[in-house]
Image (cartoon, rainbow, N blue to C red):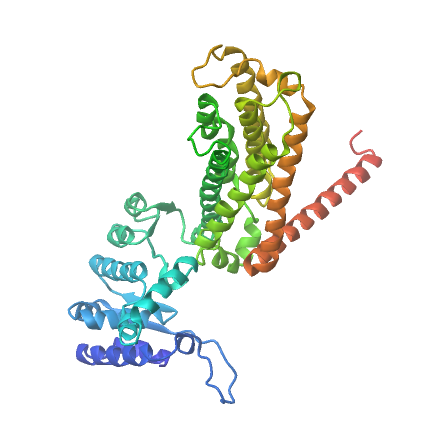
């Protein structure tokens, strides 16, 4: 297939256009996508591999003919997916929406079903289908989870913008109709690069980390209840007092994930604009929001931290009751709750993020302040004769004067965080994308350190010369 053929399609008769598109789509479907789109030389050829840009140009009359034949339209879409660009000229608003709608259906539905029909002919199809389902559940396939984006600046682009997964309107000379109907609005077309490569990537990172952090903190906290059931014969008794339990997601663990979901910026805009592959590795390949990532970040870490926070204090058996007596239920719950609250706060605020900002420190300080403030107040206002068996009055003040309480709180929290750091280090070495991002973050930090050092030297030199006198 040559690029000149695409330009000749417009000058041919409609019948010839349909025949050419049909033959081209059929031949392209039997070729390897990498050979068609990249122009890779065949094995044994003396020519070196060279990149080739392929495009298809089609007008509105041809699209009308394609629309009348569903099979031909699907072949045309298959041909378009193998090209670097498809140019549709002199088309109506409904035809724009038609192309976007069909591409969205193909993106959401994955393959066109041809591979499934071939698989059915093989022996043991059900076993193969089950295996493929398991593999696809744990492995992200970028070709099955593509999204469409439509951008326009006029009223005739509204239908197309609304059909796409993400619609972008340009506010300009043709008014604000497209901007009002779109998901995002920009002032000029050149802003699209920054919208995708910088803000789009940041948004994906923030949303993914917020969701993972939210599930993790709930998983880790409530797994301690499961561990506690092994000590109560699975009686269903709650480890935590009900008032304090209800405040976990409301006061004590909400601030770190909010800071991550609002302010996280793993890489600088200049780096993201200079190296677009950083965008490709993150969002289009869904690096942070897959089933393996969920298992690692939520299930595995949540279980390990719950074991450290709940099992270790129970197994240690350090006496923290009045006058060295055995711990009661509320003393044990307060110990576990304190370890888990501090572990979750420090992990999300300092380990999960790429950069520490002022708001990270503020979230940690406020979370600890709310924790001490809540228990300090509850220590004095809780009913004297509780019906649920939790004796709260005066317990927090008593524990604050106990060295075993502080020892377990600090040591077990450090153990949980060390396990987290170890897993992060192993993962950053084994995963190529994570290793690349970590290297870029380290490079930017070295640049910032060098720039700060130069500024300090310049300030000292100016100070010695008496410029500030």
Identified at 48% across, 26% down, the residue is 240
Identified at 58% across, 21% down, the residue is 372
Q: Nearer the viewer, residue 339 or 200?
A: 339
The percent coordinates of residue 177 (x first, y second) are 27, 45
- Residue reaching furthest right? 464
Identified at 32% across, 63% down, the residue is 110
Q: Could you tell me if residue 406 is visible in this image?
A: yes
Which quadrant, please, contains the C terminus? Answer: top right
Q: Nearer the viewer, residue 412 or 361?
A: 412
- Residue reaching furthest front? 233
The percent coordinates of residue 340 (x first, y second) are 55, 33
The percent coordinates of residue 135 (x first, y second) are 41, 62
Which quadrant, please, contains the N terminus? Answer: bottom left
The percent coordinates of residue 12 (x first, y second) are 23, 79
Image vertical order of residue 430 relative to residue 241, above or below: below
Residue 30 falls in which quadrant of the image?
bottom left
Image vertical order of residue 19 relative to residue 225, above or below: below
Q: Nearer the viewer, residue 121 or 325?
A: 325
Image vertical order of residue 38 relative to residue 46, above or below: above
Image vertical order of residue 301 relative to residue 405, above or below: below
Q: Is residue 343 left or right of residue 42?
A: right
Q: Could you tell me if residue 363 is visible in this image?
A: no
Q: Nearer the viewer, residue 244 or 8?
A: 244
Count of numbered circles on the image: 0
Q: Is residue 175 left or right of residue 422?
A: left
Q: Is residue 330 left or right of residue 13?
A: right
């Amino acid at each position: 297939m040559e690029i000149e053929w695409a330009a000749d399609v417009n000058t041919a008769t409609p019948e010839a256009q349909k025949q050419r598109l049909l033959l081209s789509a059929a031949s392209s479907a039997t070729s390897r996508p990498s050979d068609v789109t990249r122009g890779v030389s065949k094995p044994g050829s003396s020519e070196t591999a060279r990149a080739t840009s392929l495009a298809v140009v089609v007008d509105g009359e041809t699209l009308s003919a394609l629309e009348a034949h569903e099979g031909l339209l699907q072949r045309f879409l298959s041909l378009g997916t193998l090209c670097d660009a498809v140019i549709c000229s002199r088309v109506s608003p409904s035809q724009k929406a038609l192309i976007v709608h069909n591409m969205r259906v193909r993106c959401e539905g994955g393959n066109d079903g041809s591979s499934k029909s071939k698989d059915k002919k093989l022996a043991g199809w059900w076993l193969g289908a089950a295996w493929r389902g398991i593999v696809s559940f744990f492995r992200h396939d970028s070709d099955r989870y593509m999204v469409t984006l439509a951008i326009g600046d006029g009223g005739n682009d509204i239908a197309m913008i609304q059909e796409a997964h993400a619609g972008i309107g340009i506010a300009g000379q043709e008014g604000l109709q497209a901007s009002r109907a779109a998901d995002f609005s920009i002032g000029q077309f050149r802003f699209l690069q920054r919208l995708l490569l910088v803000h789009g990537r940041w948004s994906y990172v923030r949303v993914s980390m917020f969701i993972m952090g939210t599930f993790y903190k709930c998983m880790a906290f409530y797994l301690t209840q499961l561990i506690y059931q092994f000590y109560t014969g699975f009686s269903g008794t709650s480890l935590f007092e009900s008032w304090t339990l209800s405040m976990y997601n409301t006061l004590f663990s909400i601030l770190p994930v909010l800071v991550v979901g609002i302010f996280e910026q793993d890489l600088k805009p200049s780096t993201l604009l200079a190296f677009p592959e950083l965008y490709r590795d993150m969002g289009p390949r869904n690096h942070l929001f897959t089933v393996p990532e969920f298992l690692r970040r939520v299930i595995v870490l949540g279980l390990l931290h719950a074991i450290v926070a709940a099992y270790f204090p129970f197994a240690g058996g350090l006496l923290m009751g009045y006058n060295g007596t055995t711990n009661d239920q509320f003393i044990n719950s307060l110990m576990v709750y304190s370890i888990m609250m501090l572990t979750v706060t420090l992990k999300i605020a300092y380990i999960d993020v790429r950069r520490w900002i002022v708001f990270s420190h503020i979230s940690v300080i406020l979370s600890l302040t709310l924790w001490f403030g809540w228990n300090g107040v509850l220590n004095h206002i809780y009913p004297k004769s509780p019906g649920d068996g939790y004796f709260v009055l005066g317990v927090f003040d008593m524990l604050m004067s106990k060295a075993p309480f502080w020892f377990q709180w600090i040591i077990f929290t450090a153990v949980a965080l060390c396990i987290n750091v170890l897993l992060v280090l192993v993962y950053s070495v084994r995963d190529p994308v994570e290793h690349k991002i970590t290297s870029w973050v380290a490079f930017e930090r070295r640049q910032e350190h060098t720039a700060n050092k130069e500024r300090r030297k310049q300030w000292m030199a100016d100070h010695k010369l008496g410029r500030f006198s």
